[in-house]
Structures are given as C-alpha cells and as structure tokens.
C-alpha cells in the first residue's frame, strides 16, 4: 500500500500532481485535509486534533464519507507524526508527504526530522514539494534517484556523522567517505546523468534532490 499524507504547512501547491497516483491511500493531517480538497482530492482519512481544519471543509469531508480520528489538542506528537504513525501501523510500504514545508521554521525542521524516527525504519518516506524531494538513507541502505543532468543533490548527515558514503552518477563522487554532522560538504552536488545512487554505511543521511532551476 502506498500512502500520501498531506500536511498543513505553507508549502507551494505547485507540482503536487506528480506525486499522487491512482489507488493511493490519501491521509489528511488535520488542516492538510483542506488542502487536499482544494486540489480536488478527497482524503480517505483525517487524523489530528482538528484545530486547523475549517468547519466548512470538515462538513464537506463528512458528506463524502471521510473517516476522522481525532486526538486531544494536548498531545506529545504533531498531527503529521500521528498520521505517519498510523500509516506505518496500517502497513504502508511507501509514504509521500506533501504540504510539510514552508511557514514556521520549527514546524518545517520538525517535519523533516520525523524521517529519522526509529519507528519509521524500513518504510521509505519522502517529503516532496513541487520538483523537490527529501528522503532518508540509514546505515546499510542505498537510494536511487532519477532526474536530469545538472539536478541538485545535497547529502546532509543527521544525528551524527554519516560514514561509508559512496555515490554513483554524481559529478563529485564519494567513495566510502565520511560526511561530518553539521558540515556543508555534501551540499549542492549535481547529477551527471539521468540516474544516481547514494549509499551510506553507518549513520543517517538526508538526501535532497531538486531540479537545477531551483538553484
């Protein structure tokens, strides 16, 4: 099962169509359900404390038979974390997160760092906005990318150094290198052709892929 989780951030609404496929399980993370409606999508499920979901949107969703899972406002997790937890527990094998970027910096950072939670290990989760995407590679994993020559690829260690980093198809190749946590060494590499592969031996590595036009 492939899930698309739509969050309520202030990311641009451009290019979302490329990430949604027929048959995807659509989950609205609280106010993200209103964004889904604006795109012409009816979520199968809305999860969160419902503090940012307009009443008009909720009424429309209820008339469509959408399921709601409401949590108290006083909780330890964000609505997006709750939505991801639920999707993983229900057996999602791949998750795309839309609407998670923009607006408050703390929300944006927290949304990206959710990818590093141990509970999500083994489930590919990508945060996407327009043509950009971010996906986490854990120790022993490899990520394949498809794009165009000149596309930007940044490799950002999370939670400590990323060791044994090797790449194929990038202009500046790495061969078992160590990328230090907090260092900008891995920023703005480029795809040499239409495909690239990034492998990490130990640690966690956030791989960010973006069209060259963004840079």
Image: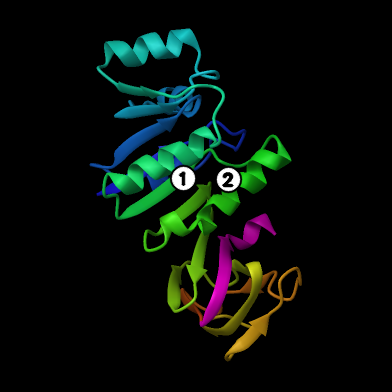
**Taking the image as drawn, is residue 66 in sight?**
yes
Question: Which is nearer the eye, 184 or 74?
Answer: 74
Q: Is residue 197 left or right of residue 101?
A: left
Q: Which mark is residue 97?
A: 1
**Residue that numbered label 2 is attached to:** 111
Residue drawn where x is 57% and y is 90% of the image:
176
Question: Based on the displayed image, in which of its 4 quarters is residue 174 positioned?
Answer: bottom right
Q: Main secondary structure of the magenta part?
A: strand
- Residue 126 is situated, as x and y percent measured from the top left of the image, at 47, 54
Question: Based on the displayed image, in which of its 4 quarters is residue 153 positioned?
Answer: bottom right
Residue drawn where x is 51% and y is 83% of the image:
201
Residue drawn where x is 37% and y is 34% of the image:
27
- Write down the region rendered in magenta: 201-215
Residue drawn where x is 57% and y is 80% of the image:
170
- Near mark 2 (Cα within 10 A), the count class, few <14, some 14-19 or many ≥20, is some
Q: Are marks 1 and 2 in contact (CB under 8 Å)?
A: yes
- Residue 143 is situated, as x and y percent measured from the top left of the image, at 45, 72
- Residue 65 is situated, as x and y percent measured from the top left of the image, at 25, 17
Q: Is residue 18 magenta?
A: no
**Quadrant assignment for the C terminus:** bottom right
Q: Residue furthest bottom?
A: 175
Q: How many marks?
A: 2
Q: Is residue 93 left or right of residue 121?
A: left
- Near mark 1 (Cα within 10 A), the count class, few <14, some 14-19 or many ≥20, is many
Location of residue 28 with respect to 159 vertically, above or below: above
Q: Is residue 138 left or right of residue 45?
A: right
What secondary structure is marked by label 2? helix
Q: Which mark is residue 9?
A: none
Question: Which is nearer the eye, 76 or 100?
Answer: 76
Whole-Å distance between the Cαs marked 1 and 2? 9 Å
């Amino acid at each position: 099962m492939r899930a698309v989780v739509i969050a309520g951030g202030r990311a641009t609404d451009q290019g979302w169509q490329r990430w949604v496929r027929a048959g995807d399980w659509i989950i609205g993370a609280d106010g993200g359900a209103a964004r889904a409606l604006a795109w012409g999508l009816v979520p199968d499920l809305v999860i969160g404390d419902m503090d940012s979901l307009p009443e008009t949107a909720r009424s429309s969703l209820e008339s469509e038979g959408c399921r709601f899972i409401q949590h108290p406002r006083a909780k330890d997790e964000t609505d997006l974390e709750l939505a991801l937890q639920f999707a993983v527990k229900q057996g999602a094998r791949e998750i795309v997160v839309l609407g998670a970027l923009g607006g408050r910096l703390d929300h944006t950072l927290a949304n990206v760092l959710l990818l590093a939670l141990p509970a999500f290990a083994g489930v590919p989760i990508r945060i996407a906005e327009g043509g950009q995407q971010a996906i986490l590679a854990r120790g022993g994993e490899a990520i394949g990318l498809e794009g165009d020559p000149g596309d930007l690829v940044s490799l950002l260690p999370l939670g400590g150094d990323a060791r044994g980093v090797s790449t194929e198809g990038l202009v500046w190749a790495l061969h078992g290198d160590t990328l230090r946590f907090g260092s900008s060494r891995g920023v703005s590499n480029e795809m040499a052709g239409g495909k690239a592969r990034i492998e990490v031996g130990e640690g966690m590595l956030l791989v960010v892929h973006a069209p060259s036009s963004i840079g």
